[in-house]
Image (spheres, rainbow, N blue to C red):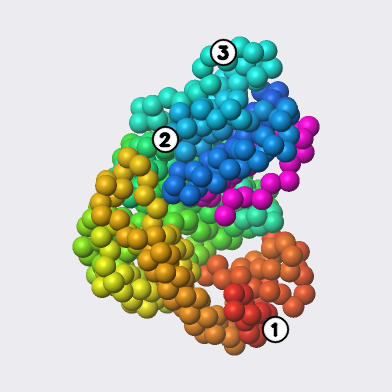
Amino acid sequence: MPPETSLDPTALDVVTFGCRLNALDSATVKALAGAAGLERAVVVNTCAVTSEAVKQARQTIRRLKREDPARRIIVTGCAAQTEPATFAAMAEVDRVLGNEEKMSPASWSATRRALDFGLDTDEKAHVGDIMRVRATAPHLLDGAADTIEGHTRAFVEVQNGCDHRCTFCIIPYGRGNSRSVPMGAVVARVRQLVEQDFAEVVLTGVDLTSYGADLPGAPRLGTLVRAVLRHVPELRRLRLSSIDSVEADGELMRAFAEEERLMPHLHLSLQAGDDLILKRMKRRHLRADAIAFCAEARRLRPDMVFGADIIAGFPTETETHFRASLDLVDACGLTHLHVFPYSPRPGTPAARMPQVPTPLIRERARRLREAGETALLRHLAGEIGTRREILAERGGLARTPGFTPVRLARELVPGTFSHIRIAGHDGTRLIAA
Protein backbone atom coordinates (compact mmCIF):
# COMPACT_ATOMS: atom_id res chain seq x y z
CA MET A 1 0.00 0.00 0.00
CA PRO A 2 1.27 3.54 -0.70
CA PRO A 3 2.17 5.61 2.34
CA GLU A 4 -0.42 7.96 3.75
CA THR A 5 0.41 11.61 3.16
CA SER A 6 -0.80 14.70 4.98
CA LEU A 7 1.51 17.45 3.83
CA ASP A 8 1.95 21.07 4.78
CA PRO A 9 1.89 22.94 1.43
CA THR A 10 4.34 25.57 2.70
CA ALA A 11 6.89 23.13 4.11
CA LEU A 12 9.45 20.59 2.98
CA ASP A 13 8.10 17.05 3.24
CA VAL A 14 9.30 13.56 2.42
CA VAL A 15 7.05 10.69 1.31
CA THR A 16 8.70 7.31 1.85
CA PHE A 17 8.05 4.00 0.13
CA GLY A 18 9.60 0.65 0.94
CA CYS A 19 11.96 -0.70 3.55
CA ARG A 20 13.30 0.41 6.91
CA LEU A 21 16.53 1.54 5.27
CA ASN A 22 14.56 3.88 3.02
CA ALA A 23 12.88 5.32 6.11
CA LEU A 24 16.31 5.95 7.63
CA ASP A 25 17.46 7.58 4.40
CA SER A 26 14.39 9.82 4.39
CA ALA A 27 15.35 11.36 7.73
CA THR A 28 18.75 12.27 6.31
CA VAL A 29 17.25 13.51 3.04
CA LYS A 30 14.89 15.84 4.89
CA ALA A 31 17.75 17.22 6.99
CA LEU A 32 20.00 17.79 3.96
CA ALA A 33 17.27 19.32 1.80
CA GLY A 34 16.20 21.57 4.66
CA ALA A 35 19.78 22.67 5.31
CA ALA A 36 20.04 23.58 1.61
CA GLY A 37 17.06 25.91 2.05
CA LEU A 38 14.58 23.91 -0.01
CA GLU A 39 10.97 24.93 0.74
CA ARG A 40 7.47 24.28 -0.65
CA ALA A 41 8.64 20.96 -1.99
CA VAL A 42 8.04 17.28 -1.45
CA VAL A 43 10.67 14.57 -1.87
CA VAL A 44 9.33 11.17 -2.93
CA ASN A 45 11.77 8.48 -1.75
CA THR A 46 10.88 5.49 -3.93
CA CYS A 47 11.20 1.73 -3.68
CA ALA A 48 12.07 -0.60 -6.56
CA VAL A 49 11.48 -3.99 -4.98
CA THR A 50 8.34 -4.66 -7.07
CA SER A 51 6.71 -3.19 -10.15
CA GLU A 52 3.73 -2.36 -7.96
CA ALA A 53 5.95 -0.20 -5.71
CA VAL A 54 7.06 1.82 -8.75
CA LYS A 55 3.45 2.13 -9.94
CA GLN A 56 2.35 3.39 -6.52
CA ALA A 57 5.14 5.97 -6.46
CA ARG A 58 4.06 7.34 -9.85
CA GLN A 59 0.42 7.47 -8.72
CA THR A 60 1.42 9.34 -5.57
CA ILE A 61 3.47 11.84 -7.57
CA ARG A 62 0.51 12.61 -9.82
CA ARG A 63 -1.82 12.97 -6.86
CA LEU A 64 0.56 15.31 -5.03
CA LYS A 65 0.78 17.54 -8.09
CA ARG A 66 -3.00 17.61 -8.51
CA GLU A 67 -3.43 18.59 -4.87
CA ASP A 68 -0.90 21.43 -5.12
CA PRO A 69 0.29 22.33 -8.65
CA ALA A 70 2.78 24.87 -7.26
CA ARG A 71 4.57 22.31 -5.08
CA ARG A 72 7.97 21.20 -6.45
CA ILE A 73 8.49 17.43 -6.59
CA ILE A 74 11.89 15.75 -6.29
CA VAL A 75 12.08 11.99 -6.81
CA THR A 76 14.85 9.84 -5.36
CA GLY A 77 15.38 6.34 -3.95
CA CYS A 78 15.87 2.94 -5.52
CA ALA A 79 13.30 3.30 -8.32
CA ALA A 80 14.78 6.68 -9.25
CA GLN A 81 18.21 5.01 -9.35
CA THR A 82 17.11 2.08 -11.51
CA GLU A 83 14.56 3.92 -13.69
CA PRO A 84 15.61 7.59 -13.82
CA ALA A 85 14.13 8.12 -17.28
CA THR A 86 10.71 6.88 -16.08
CA PHE A 87 10.46 9.66 -13.52
CA ALA A 88 12.29 12.33 -15.53
CA ALA A 89 9.66 11.89 -18.25
CA MET A 90 6.86 12.75 -15.83
CA ALA A 91 5.69 16.35 -16.24
CA GLU A 92 4.92 16.50 -12.51
CA VAL A 93 8.56 15.84 -11.54
CA ASP A 94 11.02 18.72 -11.19
CA ARG A 95 14.18 16.78 -10.28
CA VAL A 96 15.40 13.17 -10.04
CA LEU A 97 18.29 12.31 -7.72
CA GLY A 98 20.06 8.95 -7.44
CA ASN A 99 20.69 7.10 -4.19
CA GLU A 100 24.22 8.45 -3.83
CA GLU A 101 23.23 11.96 -4.87
CA LYS A 102 20.40 12.14 -2.34
CA MET A 103 22.99 11.89 0.46
CA SER A 104 25.12 14.75 -0.90
CA PRO A 105 24.69 18.29 0.53
CA ALA A 106 26.01 19.63 -2.81
CA SER A 107 23.23 17.83 -4.70
CA TRP A 108 20.56 19.46 -2.57
CA SER A 109 22.15 22.91 -2.89
CA ALA A 110 22.24 22.46 -6.67
CA THR A 111 18.63 21.25 -6.62
CA ARG A 112 17.47 24.31 -4.68
CA ARG A 113 19.27 26.66 -7.10
CA ALA A 114 17.81 24.85 -10.10
CA LEU A 115 14.27 25.01 -8.72
CA ASP A 116 14.46 28.56 -7.41
CA PHE A 117 16.38 30.20 -10.24
CA GLY A 118 15.81 27.95 -13.23
CA LEU A 119 19.41 26.77 -13.47
CA ASP A 120 20.31 23.43 -15.01
CA THR A 121 16.74 22.85 -16.13
CA ASP A 122 17.88 21.07 -19.29
CA GLU A 123 18.95 18.06 -17.25
CA LYS A 124 16.25 16.89 -14.87
CA ALA A 125 17.88 13.61 -13.77
CA HIS A 126 21.07 13.55 -11.70
CA VAL A 127 21.77 9.87 -11.21
CA GLY A 128 25.31 8.50 -11.10
CA ASP A 129 26.66 4.95 -11.37
CA ILE A 130 25.85 3.43 -7.98
CA MET A 131 28.17 0.49 -8.70
CA ARG A 132 31.15 2.82 -8.52
CA VAL A 133 30.40 3.75 -4.90
CA ARG A 134 32.85 1.99 -2.60
CA ALA A 135 32.92 3.90 0.68
CA THR A 136 30.25 4.45 3.27
CA ALA A 137 28.68 7.89 3.08
CA PRO A 138 28.97 10.35 5.99
CA HIS A 139 25.25 10.07 6.71
CA LEU A 140 25.81 6.54 7.98
CA LEU A 141 27.87 7.92 10.84
CA ASP A 142 26.20 11.11 11.97
CA GLY A 143 22.94 9.62 13.18
CA ALA A 144 20.68 11.81 11.05
CA ALA A 145 19.28 8.70 9.42
CA ASP A 146 18.02 7.10 12.64
CA THR A 147 14.29 6.47 12.70
CA ILE A 148 12.91 6.51 16.21
CA GLU A 149 9.80 4.58 17.29
CA GLY A 150 8.12 6.15 20.29
CA HIS A 151 11.48 7.24 21.68
CA THR A 152 12.17 3.63 22.60
CA ARG A 153 13.93 2.13 19.60
CA ALA A 154 16.65 3.60 17.38
CA PHE A 155 17.79 2.15 14.05
CA VAL A 156 21.46 2.35 13.09
CA GLU A 157 22.44 1.62 9.50
CA VAL A 158 25.71 -0.32 9.56
CA GLN A 159 25.77 -1.64 5.98
CA ASN A 160 24.42 -0.71 2.54
CA GLY A 161 24.31 -2.38 -0.86
CA CYS A 162 24.52 -6.04 -1.87
CA ASP A 163 27.10 -8.15 -3.71
CA HIS A 164 24.66 -10.95 -4.52
CA ARG A 165 22.54 -11.21 -7.65
CA CYS A 166 19.32 -13.07 -6.88
CA THR A 167 17.44 -13.50 -10.13
CA PHE A 168 14.28 -11.73 -8.91
CA CYS A 169 15.97 -8.75 -7.25
CA ILE A 170 16.67 -5.27 -8.63
CA ILE A 171 17.92 -3.83 -5.32
CA PRO A 172 21.70 -4.20 -5.95
CA TYR A 173 21.24 -1.93 -8.97
CA GLY A 174 19.52 0.61 -6.75
CA ARG A 175 21.84 0.37 -3.75
CA GLY A 176 25.15 -0.66 -5.28
CA ASN A 177 27.69 -3.13 -3.94
CA SER A 178 28.04 -3.97 -0.25
CA ARG A 179 29.85 -1.48 1.97
CA SER A 180 30.11 -1.31 5.75
CA VAL A 181 30.45 1.27 8.49
CA PRO A 182 33.61 0.76 10.59
CA MET A 183 32.97 -0.87 13.96
CA GLY A 184 34.32 2.06 15.96
CA ALA A 185 31.84 4.43 14.33
CA VAL A 186 28.95 2.05 14.99
CA VAL A 187 29.91 1.65 18.65
CA ALA A 188 30.24 5.42 19.05
CA ARG A 189 26.80 5.99 17.54
CA VAL A 190 25.17 3.35 19.75
CA ARG A 191 26.80 4.88 22.82
CA GLN A 192 25.45 8.30 21.79
CA LEU A 193 21.93 6.91 21.43
CA VAL A 194 22.09 5.25 24.87
CA GLU A 195 23.21 8.57 26.35
CA GLN A 196 20.05 10.03 24.76
CA ASP A 197 18.04 7.46 26.76
CA PHE A 198 17.19 5.02 23.99
CA ALA A 199 16.60 1.61 25.49
CA GLU A 200 16.88 -0.44 22.31
CA VAL A 201 19.01 -0.24 19.19
CA VAL A 202 18.44 -2.15 15.94
CA LEU A 203 21.36 -2.75 13.57
CA THR A 204 20.14 -2.65 10.00
CA GLY A 205 21.38 -2.84 6.39
CA VAL A 206 20.50 -4.10 2.92
CA ASP A 207 22.44 -7.37 3.38
CA LEU A 208 23.30 -7.26 7.06
CA THR A 209 25.14 -10.58 7.28
CA SER A 210 27.64 -9.42 4.63
CA TYR A 211 28.81 -6.80 7.14
CA GLY A 212 32.55 -6.21 7.30
CA ALA A 213 33.77 -7.98 4.16
CA ASP A 214 35.03 -4.66 2.77
CA LEU A 215 36.64 -3.47 6.02
CA PRO A 216 40.26 -4.06 7.13
CA GLY A 217 40.50 -7.50 8.71
CA ALA A 218 37.04 -8.41 7.35
CA PRO A 219 35.19 -8.51 10.71
CA ARG A 220 31.89 -10.37 10.67
CA LEU A 221 28.49 -9.31 11.99
CA GLY A 222 29.03 -11.38 15.13
CA THR A 223 32.20 -9.41 15.87
CA LEU A 224 30.29 -6.15 15.53
CA VAL A 225 27.49 -7.38 17.82
CA ARG A 226 30.01 -8.43 20.48
CA ALA A 227 31.80 -5.09 20.21
CA VAL A 228 28.60 -3.10 20.67
CA LEU A 229 27.53 -5.13 23.70
CA ARG A 230 31.00 -5.05 25.25
CA HIS A 231 31.72 -1.36 24.77
CA VAL A 232 28.20 -0.08 25.51
CA PRO A 233 27.26 -2.04 28.66
CA GLU A 234 24.41 0.41 29.41
CA LEU A 235 22.51 -0.70 26.29
CA ARG A 236 19.52 -2.72 27.47
CA ARG A 237 18.49 -4.32 24.18
CA LEU A 238 20.20 -4.93 20.83
CA ARG A 239 18.31 -6.27 17.82
CA LEU A 240 19.13 -7.22 14.26
CA SER A 241 17.02 -6.49 11.20
CA SER A 242 16.58 -9.03 8.38
CA ILE A 243 19.47 -11.46 7.87
CA ASP A 244 20.47 -14.11 5.35
CA SER A 245 20.72 -17.24 7.51
CA VAL A 246 23.31 -18.95 5.31
CA GLU A 247 25.75 -16.09 6.02
CA ALA A 248 25.28 -16.04 9.80
CA ASP A 249 28.73 -16.50 11.34
CA GLY A 250 29.65 -18.64 14.33
CA GLU A 251 30.38 -15.69 16.57
CA LEU A 252 26.92 -14.30 15.93
CA MET A 253 25.32 -17.60 16.87
CA ARG A 254 27.41 -17.82 20.06
CA ALA A 255 26.33 -14.28 20.89
CA PHE A 256 22.68 -15.33 20.74
CA ALA A 257 23.46 -18.16 23.16
CA GLU A 258 25.48 -16.06 25.59
CA GLU A 259 24.22 -12.47 25.41
CA GLU A 260 20.85 -11.88 27.07
CA ARG A 261 20.82 -8.30 25.77
CA LEU A 262 20.82 -9.59 22.17
CA MET A 263 17.12 -10.08 21.55
CA PRO A 264 15.85 -13.54 20.48
CA HIS A 265 14.17 -12.48 17.26
CA LEU A 266 15.43 -13.01 13.71
CA HIS A 267 13.75 -12.08 10.44
CA LEU A 268 15.09 -14.44 7.77
CA SER A 269 15.40 -13.94 4.03
CA LEU A 270 14.18 -17.43 3.05
CA GLN A 271 12.10 -16.62 -0.09
CA ALA A 272 11.12 -20.23 -0.93
CA GLY A 273 11.06 -23.76 0.45
CA ASP A 274 11.80 -25.81 -2.67
CA ASP A 275 15.38 -26.51 -3.74
CA LEU A 276 14.79 -26.12 -7.48
CA ILE A 277 13.05 -22.77 -7.01
CA LEU A 278 15.84 -21.64 -4.65
CA LYS A 279 18.40 -22.51 -7.32
CA ARG A 280 16.42 -20.62 -9.97
CA MET A 281 16.28 -17.68 -7.58
CA LYS A 282 20.08 -17.98 -7.26
CA ARG A 283 19.82 -18.17 -3.51
CA ARG A 284 22.78 -19.51 -1.54
CA HIS A 285 20.92 -21.97 0.66
CA LEU A 286 18.75 -25.07 0.26
CA ARG A 287 15.62 -26.05 2.15
CA ALA A 288 17.57 -28.27 4.55
CA ASP A 289 19.93 -25.38 5.35
CA ALA A 290 17.04 -23.17 6.43
CA ILE A 291 15.49 -25.86 8.61
CA ALA A 292 18.86 -26.73 10.18
CA PHE A 293 19.61 -23.07 10.89
CA CYS A 294 16.31 -22.54 12.69
CA ALA A 295 16.78 -25.73 14.72
CA GLU A 296 20.31 -24.71 15.73
CA ALA A 297 19.30 -21.15 16.59
CA ARG A 298 16.49 -22.49 18.77
CA ARG A 299 18.86 -24.95 20.43
CA LEU A 300 21.17 -22.09 21.31
CA ARG A 301 18.31 -19.76 22.30
CA PRO A 302 15.11 -21.70 23.08
CA ASP A 303 12.94 -18.56 23.12
CA MET A 304 13.99 -17.54 19.59
CA VAL A 305 11.16 -16.16 17.44
CA PHE A 306 11.46 -16.20 13.65
CA GLY A 307 9.98 -14.02 10.95
CA ALA A 308 10.62 -14.63 7.27
CA ASP A 309 10.22 -13.27 3.75
CA ILE A 310 8.64 -15.73 1.31
CA ILE A 311 7.78 -15.12 -2.35
CA ALA A 312 4.58 -16.61 -3.75
CA GLY A 313 4.38 -17.53 -7.43
CA PHE A 314 8.01 -17.28 -8.51
CA PRO A 315 8.39 -18.12 -12.23
CA THR A 316 8.11 -21.86 -13.00
CA GLU A 317 6.65 -22.55 -9.51
CA THR A 318 4.35 -25.58 -9.59
CA GLU A 319 1.87 -26.58 -6.90
CA THR A 320 4.46 -29.05 -5.57
CA HIS A 321 7.08 -26.31 -5.38
CA PHE A 322 4.61 -24.02 -3.64
CA ARG A 323 3.63 -26.64 -1.09
CA ALA A 324 7.28 -26.91 -0.10
CA SER A 325 7.24 -23.20 0.73
CA LEU A 326 3.93 -23.58 2.56
CA ASP A 327 5.32 -26.47 4.59
CA LEU A 328 8.42 -24.43 5.47
CA VAL A 329 6.32 -22.34 7.87
CA ASP A 330 5.95 -25.35 10.18
CA ALA A 331 9.29 -26.96 9.37
CA CYS A 332 11.19 -23.84 10.46
CA GLY A 333 8.74 -22.82 13.17
CA LEU A 334 8.11 -19.40 11.64
CA THR A 335 5.91 -16.91 13.47
CA HIS A 336 5.85 -13.62 11.55
CA LEU A 337 5.45 -14.08 7.78
CA HIS A 338 6.08 -11.34 5.21
CA VAL A 339 4.57 -12.63 1.96
CA PHE A 340 5.53 -11.12 -1.40
CA PRO A 341 3.38 -11.99 -4.43
CA TYR A 342 5.99 -12.31 -7.19
CA SER A 343 6.22 -9.24 -9.41
CA PRO A 344 8.56 -9.27 -12.44
CA ARG A 345 11.19 -6.53 -12.47
CA PRO A 346 12.43 -5.59 -15.96
CA GLY A 347 16.13 -6.27 -16.28
CA THR A 348 16.19 -9.23 -13.90
CA PRO A 349 16.70 -12.84 -15.10
CA ALA A 350 13.48 -14.00 -13.42
CA ALA A 351 11.45 -11.61 -15.58
CA ARG A 352 12.52 -13.67 -18.62
CA MET A 353 11.48 -17.00 -17.08
CA PRO A 354 8.05 -18.62 -17.68
CA GLN A 355 5.63 -16.68 -15.48
CA VAL A 356 2.95 -18.03 -13.15
CA PRO A 357 -0.53 -16.60 -13.95
CA THR A 358 -1.35 -13.58 -11.78
CA PRO A 359 -4.56 -15.06 -10.30
CA LEU A 360 -2.60 -18.12 -9.20
CA ILE A 361 0.11 -15.93 -7.65
CA ARG A 362 -2.55 -14.09 -5.64
CA GLU A 363 -4.19 -17.34 -4.55
CA ARG A 364 -0.85 -18.77 -3.35
CA ALA A 365 -0.03 -15.54 -1.54
CA ARG A 366 -3.38 -15.81 0.24
CA ARG A 367 -2.64 -19.37 1.33
CA LEU A 368 0.79 -18.36 2.62
CA ARG A 369 -0.71 -15.49 4.59
CA GLU A 370 -3.28 -17.86 6.09
CA ALA A 371 -0.46 -20.18 7.15
CA GLY A 372 1.30 -17.20 8.69
CA GLU A 373 -1.85 -16.22 10.58
CA THR A 374 -2.17 -19.76 11.94
CA ALA A 375 1.47 -19.76 13.01
CA LEU A 376 1.07 -16.40 14.74
CA LEU A 377 -2.02 -17.60 16.63
CA ARG A 378 -0.07 -20.66 17.78
CA HIS A 379 2.74 -18.43 19.03
CA LEU A 380 0.36 -16.05 20.81
CA ALA A 381 -1.46 -18.93 22.51
CA GLY A 382 1.86 -20.38 23.65
CA GLU A 383 2.72 -17.12 25.39
CA ILE A 384 -0.37 -17.12 27.64
CA GLY A 385 0.60 -17.57 31.27
CA THR A 386 4.25 -16.64 30.78
CA ARG A 387 6.03 -13.69 32.38
CA ARG A 388 7.94 -11.39 30.03
CA GLU A 389 10.06 -8.28 30.39
CA ILE A 390 8.46 -5.76 28.07
CA LEU A 391 9.66 -2.42 26.71
CA ALA A 392 6.85 0.13 26.71
CA GLU A 393 6.01 2.11 23.59
CA ARG A 394 3.37 4.74 22.93
CA GLY A 395 -0.35 4.14 22.89
CA GLY A 396 -0.46 1.51 25.62
CA LEU A 397 1.65 -0.96 23.64
CA ALA A 398 4.91 -2.76 24.39
CA ARG A 399 7.21 -5.40 22.88
CA THR A 400 8.50 -8.65 24.31
CA PRO A 401 12.12 -9.71 23.72
CA GLY A 402 10.76 -11.79 20.80
CA PHE A 403 9.31 -8.59 19.30
CA THR A 404 5.72 -9.69 19.83
CA PRO A 405 3.43 -6.68 20.48
CA VAL A 406 1.62 -6.52 23.83
CA ARG A 407 -1.45 -4.50 24.75
CA LEU A 408 -0.89 -3.21 28.26
CA ALA A 409 -3.48 -3.09 31.04
CA ARG A 410 -2.32 0.43 31.81
CA GLU A 411 -0.18 2.80 29.81
CA LEU A 412 3.47 2.98 30.86
CA VAL A 413 6.03 5.67 30.16
CA PRO A 414 7.55 4.95 26.70
CA GLY A 415 11.07 3.60 27.01
CA THR A 416 10.56 1.98 30.41
CA PHE A 417 10.76 -1.72 31.24
CA SER A 418 8.33 -3.81 33.23
CA HIS A 419 7.78 -7.48 34.01
CA ILE A 420 4.25 -8.55 33.17
CA ARG A 421 2.20 -11.72 32.92
CA ILE A 422 0.56 -12.57 29.60
CA ALA A 423 -3.17 -13.09 30.15
CA GLY A 424 -4.38 -13.63 26.58
CA HIS A 425 -4.30 -12.36 23.01
CA ASP A 426 -6.60 -10.70 20.48
CA GLY A 427 -5.37 -12.58 17.41
CA THR A 428 -2.57 -10.14 16.57
CA ARG A 429 -1.22 -8.96 19.94
CA LEU A 430 -0.68 -10.35 23.40
CA ILE A 431 -2.71 -8.93 26.28
CA ALA A 432 -1.03 -8.16 29.59
CA ALA A 433 -2.72 -9.08 32.86
Mark 2 or mark 1: whose residue is earlier in sequence: 2
Which residue carries the number 1 mark? 433
- The CA span between labels 2 and 3 is 22 Å
* Residue situated furthest bottom in the rendering: 385
Q: Quadrant of residue 29?
A: top right
Chain-order first, disc 3 or disc 1? 3
Residue pointed to by mark 2:
82
Q: Which residue is located at x 31 percent, y 44 percent?
A: 348
Let me know if residue 80 is in the magenta part: no
384 or 366: which is nearer to us? 366
Q: Amino acid at mark 1?
A: Ala
- Foreground tag (3 vs 1): 3
Q: CA distance from mark 3 to mark 1?
A: 62 Å
Q: Is label 2 in contact with label 3 (beta carbons under 8 Å)?
A: no
- Whether pointer 3 and pointer 1 mark residues with C-beta atoms closer than 8 Å, the reply is no
Q: Is residue 224 visible?
A: no
Q: Which residue is denoted by mark 3 in the rendering?
A: 120
Closer to viewer: mark 2 or mark 1: 2
Magenta stretch? 1-28
Q: Residue at x 73, y 28 (%)?
A: 70
Find numbered disc 1 in the image and state the secondary structure of the residue it sits on.
loop
Q: How many marks?
A: 3
Image coordinates for residue 390, horizontal then vertical, percent: 63, 71
Amino acid carrying label 2: it is Thr
Q: Residue at x 33, y 76 (%)?
A: 327
The foreground one among 214 and 94 is: 94
Label 3 CA crowd tier, 10 Å (few <14, some 14–19, many 20+): few
Q: Are marks 2 and 1 in contact (CB under 8 Å)?
A: no
Mark closest to the chain's N terminus, 2 or 3: 2
